[in-house]
Image (spheres, rainbow, N blue to C red):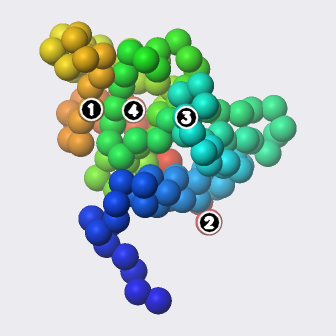
Amino acid sequence: MTPIKYSDLNSKQKEIYNFQKVAALLADYGFNCIKLADDWQGADFLAYHMDGISTLRVQLKSRLSIAKKYEGKELHMAFPVKGIWYLISHDKLVELVSQHCDWLKTDSWINKGAYTSAAPSKALLKAIDASRLQAHL
């Protein structure tokens, strides 16, 4: 078996790869993840908890992202930053962004309704630290 290089994957392959990575981490937290064929109510996948009660609708991103179209939809965002995966409510993420960044004042947010960053500030990373997913074996 030969490991692949992420950079060699096309966009669909990257999405599947990222889903597998985050689903493996969520298994350690008692979640079973089901990839959806299309964005259902904004979600790329569902994460069902073993308690039989909790279900998360998750939008999967390759970097930290917020978008007006996700506001108020009870979506969670899953994304990596420097190889560390995070899972956080979109609306909570927007709230933390407003407290620690000026993204909501940018042309991208105001006119295009979205903002993404591959390198968020140290302050924002500290604010979302509780949402970091860690492997537990």
SS at circle 3 = strand
Q: What residue is disc 1 on?
A: 116
Q: Tell us which disc is closer to us: 3 or 2.
A: 3
Q: Is residue 121 left or right of residue 60?
A: left
Q: CA distance from mark 3 to mark 4?
A: 25 Å
Q: CA distance from mark 1 to mark 2?
A: 32 Å
Q: Tell us which disc is closer to us: 1 or 4.
A: 1
The residue drawn where x is 43% and y is 48% is 85
SS at circle 1 = strand
Q: Does label 3 or label 2 sit earlier along the sequence?
A: 3
Q: Is residue 122 left or right of residue 2?
A: left
Q: Quadrant of residue 11?
A: bottom left
Q: What residue is disc 2 on?
A: 137
SS at circle 2 = loop
SS at circle 4 = loop
Rendered location of residue 9, percent (x, y): 34, 65
Q: CA distance from mark 4 to mark 2?
A: 23 Å
